[in-house]
């Protein structure tokens, strides 16, 4: 895919599109109606949208806010996947690739934050998973 906009050149944006594709495949296998299924669809869409919007901001503070929102959406996606497993709507082996991609994206987004945040010392990293994964 040709990159027309700056956000399309970001690795994390490209990863978020791959996640959306993967989520679509998973959602197609779940026939039951479930709030976590609907929320996974919404929040996985939120990630690339917030990355794109954040990359378009001129203020570092605004950019950091949107990248942080995208990171939180990645964490929310992971929780949605857990909820689907607990409800027996999918199994743990099926969600593992998505959770690995989400962890990678959360770390990438966290890595962008100190460049734009007015208070980088306030950014927590422990909620992105341990470095021993």
Image (tube, rainbow, N blue to C red):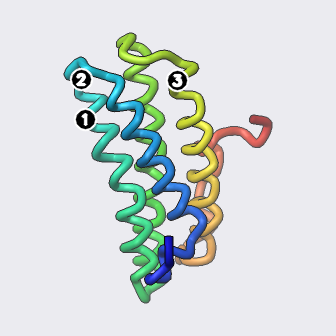
Numbered label attached to residue 38: 1
Residue at the left extreme, as displayed: 33
Q: Dots 1 and 2: beta carbons under 8 Å?
A: yes
Q: Which residue is mark 3?
A: 94
Q: Left or right of 44: which side holds 35?
A: left
- Closer to the camera in the image, 126 or 8: 8
In the picture shown, does residue 51 fall above or below 81?
below
Q: Left or right of 89: which side holds 17?
A: right
Query: Which is nearer the N-term, disc 3 or disc 2?
Result: 2
Q: Left or right of 25: which side holds 92?
A: right
Q: For the residue carrying disc 2, how many other residues have a C-alpha within 10 Å: few (<14), some (14-19), or many (20+)?
A: few
Tell me the mark number nearer the camera, choosing from 1 and 3: 3
Tell me the mark number nearer the camera, choosing from 3 and 2: 3
Q: Dots 1 and 3: beta carbons under 8 Å?
A: no
Residue at the front extreme, as displayed: 1
Q: Which residue is mark 2?
A: 34
Per the image, label 3 sits on a secondary structure element best described as: helix
- Closer to the camera in the image, 97 or 75: 97
């Amino acid at each position: 895919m040709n990159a027309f906009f700056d956000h399309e050149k970001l690795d994390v944006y490209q990863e978020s599109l791959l996640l959306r594709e993967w989520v679509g495949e998973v959602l197609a296998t779940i026939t039951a109606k479930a709030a976590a299924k609907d929320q996974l669809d919404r929040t996985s869409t939120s990630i690339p949208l917030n990355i794109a919007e954040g990359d378009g901001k001129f203020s570092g503070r605004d950019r950091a806010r949107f990248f942080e929102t995208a990171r939180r959406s990645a964490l929310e996606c992971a929780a949605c996947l857990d909820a689907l497993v607990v409800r027996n709507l999918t199994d743990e082996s099926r969600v593992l690739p998505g959770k690995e991609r989400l962890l990678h994206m959360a770390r990438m987004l966290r890595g962008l934050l100190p460049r734009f945040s007015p208070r980088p010392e306030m950014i927590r990293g422990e909620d992105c998973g341990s470095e021993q994964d």
